[in-house]
Image: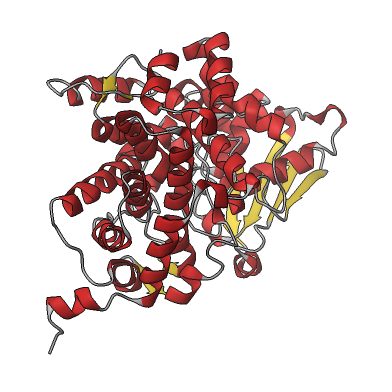
Amino acid sequence: MLPSAASYRESPPEYLLEVSHFICNTRFEDLPPAVVDRARRLIADLLGIVTAGNQSDELKAFASTYLEGSSTGASWVIGTKHRASARDAGFLNGIASTWHDFDEGSTIAYSHPGSQTIPAAFAAAQALGISGRDLLLAIVMGYEACARVGMASKMRVSVHPHGTTGTIGSAVAIARMKGFDEARMRQVINVAATMAMTTNRQAMLDEATVRNMYSGHSALAGATAVQLVQAGFTGQRDGIGFTYGTVIADGFDPQRYVSGLGRDWLILQGYFKLHPSGRYSHAAIDALESALATVPGGKLDIDQIERIDVRAFQMAALLAGTNITTSFGAKFSIPFALATILVHGRSAVECFDLDAVRNPRVQALVAKIDVREEPAYTKAYPGRQICDLAIHLRDGSAVRGRCEVMKGEPANPHRAEDVEKKYFDLMSPVWGADRARKLYDAILALEEVADMREFADRYAL
């Protein structure tokens, strides 16, 4: 016999009591300086990524129809002239955040907590007019709440991480800004957990851009979860445990979820991307850079390449496709990533666009690249992300490279100036160099902002 609904509400799981207390009672002053700085830089990174995403023809067309007849609001559709309600802006910016697959992520959390949390939080902060300190605190709380789900779950390989744990991150961030107490925060977490999408990784491998909607769903579902709880809706007793223990994952460990809470900040254990492609392809790109570092001048005559062999862990080996016909598909193909970098000498956004896909030199090289799983490397993952690469030349020689830990991981971080350069490369063409600089400086001093609505008015396009 199932327990009554009342008994469920009266006996929440201990880990939910602990995490809701942490979310509702942590103050901005309790955050370590490194955590605050990381949150600022996450926002800056995301603004550049979303700006670039919102320039795509598909998102321009979608925004024009989606916002038709909608009431205007204070929140930016970032990188455009549109202002919208927090719900609509969060949804559109969430989609744009993954359009170029350039967004921050976390290997330990098996997800991209920043792009799943910040679009909704940033839009809500502008609508609510809260302070920059409250926004930063809310983002950190949302990040920890959703990243820990991925860390504590046995996520299935077939499930794409976007649109899953992110519903919790977005909901927690908004609820924290609205001052929810612990009981309502638990309801928000439980409601948001049951609103996770049953996403699938095959959509990505099939070059289906609907996959980019998943992050938009995280923002929209998170905002909706908060509104539902405000209206009196309730969640199940343990939304996280059931959803991630039985539905879209094969197990959830509540003790691991709260282990080190407030001490081991997962926001500090994520990575930034410097290549607009699927994260696992970065192991092969790093191996390529390692190989090219042994070549005089760092360049090879691609006409002399006979074949390229790549051996990697399972998640990277899934990105082995060579029949690439779209820009989206290009981002999830190791052969394409390596080929376009070798042809163009860089990995900018335009190196993965449709013109690059149609480049016959790139396609000819793609056909020469073989990617396979090495079981020993899969066993070493995620602690190490090993990838070996061998470029075999026509003269019988070979150039070899290896990745042990991907660049950007906490054990192998990017230089701060390289991440900053990425921001300006993405922002300046749209915002202008001067406005992009002023906005960047303002974000790095966000705790000094008294009203995010005024901030939106001051720095808008």
Q: Nearer the viewer, residue 156 or 187?
A: 187
- Which residue: 42% across, 69% down? 18
Outermost residue on the right side: it is: 296
Q: Return the x and y of residue 348 as percentages of the image width and height.
A: 58, 26
- Residue in the image at 29% along x and 67% along y: 243
List x then y, in percent, for residue 120: 34, 39
- Percent across and percent down for residue 226 are 24, 49
Residue 266 image point, x, y percent:
55, 56
Image: 286 above or below 452 = below
Q: Name the quadrant of the C terminus.
A: top left
| View extreme (bottom): residue | 1
Question: Residue 138's image quarter?
Answer: top left
Q: Is 289 placed above or below 315 here?
A: above
User: Could you tell me how many numbered marks the image carries?
Assistant: 0
Decide if residue 6 is on the left or right side of residue 400. left
Is residue 154 visible from the viewing direction of this image?
yes
| Quarter of the rendering occupied by the N terminus | bottom left
Q: Residue 207 falls in which quadrant of the image?
A: top left
**Residue at 36%, 34% in the rendered image:** 125
The answer to whether residue 325 shows anywhere in this view is no
Vertically, is 452 above or below 216? above
Task: Pick the residue in front: 232 or 218.
Answer: 232
- Taking the image as shown, residue 174 lies to the left or right of residue 352, namely left
Colour style of the rendered protein structure: secondary structure
